[in-house]
Amino acid sequence: MAAAVKIVPRHIAIIMDGNGRWARQRGLPRIRGHEQGAEAVRECVEGCGELKIEYLTLYAFSAENWQRPKSEVFALMRLLEKFLKDKTPELIEKNVRLQAIGRLTDLPDRCQKRLHESIKRTADNTGLTLILALSYGGRDEIIDGIRSLLREIEAGHIDKAMINAEMFSKHLYTRYYPDPDLLIRTSGEMRISNFLLWQLSYTEMYVTAKLWPDFTRKDLFAAVEDFSKRQRRYGGVDVL
Ligand code: FPP
């Protein structure tokens, strides 16, 4: 199946939604949905490797997710810590480079430590770059970008007249990565939910009714195949 896909996106971003509903449908606690969601992450990373995708950004914990019940936030942080501890050897074996975006200093110290350890241990890998969006908010990112730009102006490193979209992109968390080509959202919701607001300007969207814990590499291949048939015009017109 993977071999049939001709044009693959360089960068896929995913809003992994529906863990809670998956658990509710089975009469299980919400955290079981998140645990199963972590397994779907593994499957998706493998699928991206097969397709030779360069970048995969996963919305793993939003700035708004801190408002969830304390017990769920705690369980999600524990799960992240466990994921980093258990899966880092697998990431190394699969040549995956781990990165993270967001207000990472909001995370519990133990998570930050594990995260930076995993980032360091996978830094020389040359395959897929897996970017976890953690305590991430698109509006926060833009505000942090403006603050960073103002610091540069105040320090006299740049002139206000030099500001343009390309320069501003260099002040975002994502400055090292290309913009996503394809955004996948699971569970049928048609929202951006404060994810990569700047970077998704020309990204192709794919929404599937599948709940994230049920998302398999076959679903990933279907999304990429759909993407390969799209005509991207970036606001221009088709050239005949
Ligand atoms: C949305 O489902 C999902 C999240 C808020 C967390 C995403 C986390 C994972 C997929 C597991 C952990 C990932 C890693 C990388 C360790 P929801 O809870 O909003 O679902 P609902 O809308 O059905 O309630």
Image (cartoon, grey):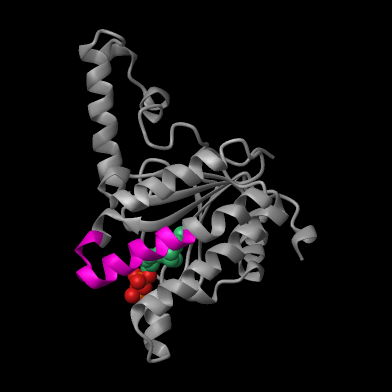
The residue closer to the viewer here, 122 or 231, is 122
Q: Main secondary structure of the magenta part?
A: helix
The quarter in which the N terminus is drawn is bottom right
User: Which residue lies at the image location 36% right of the left edge and 64% below the top edge?
Assistant: 78
User: Which residue lies at the image location 64% right of the left edge and 55% below the top edge?
Assistant: 48
The residue closer to the viewer here, 160 or 80, is 80
Left or right of 145? Residue 229 is right
Residue 41: image x %, image y %?
53, 63
The quarter in which the C terminus is drawn is top right
- Write down the region rendered in magenta: 66-83
Left or right of 107? Residue 88 is right
Left or right of 28? Residue 176 is right
The quadrant where residue 47 appears: bottom right
Instruction: Using the image, determine if residue 141 lies above or below residue 146.
Output: below
Ligand 1 quadrant?
Answer: bottom left
User: Which residue lies at the image location 42% right of the left edge and 49% below the top edge?
Assistant: 114
Q: Is residue 2 visible in this depiction of the protein? A: yes
Residue 45: image x %, image y %?
60, 58
Judge whether residue 157 is colored magenta. Answer: no
Residue 65: image x %, image y %?
27, 61
Q: Count the marks: how many? A: 0
Instruction: Using the image, determine if residue 150 lies above or below residue 188.
Output: above
Extreme residue in the right direction? 3
User: Which residue lies at the image location 63% right of the left edge and 61% below the top edge?
Assistant: 226
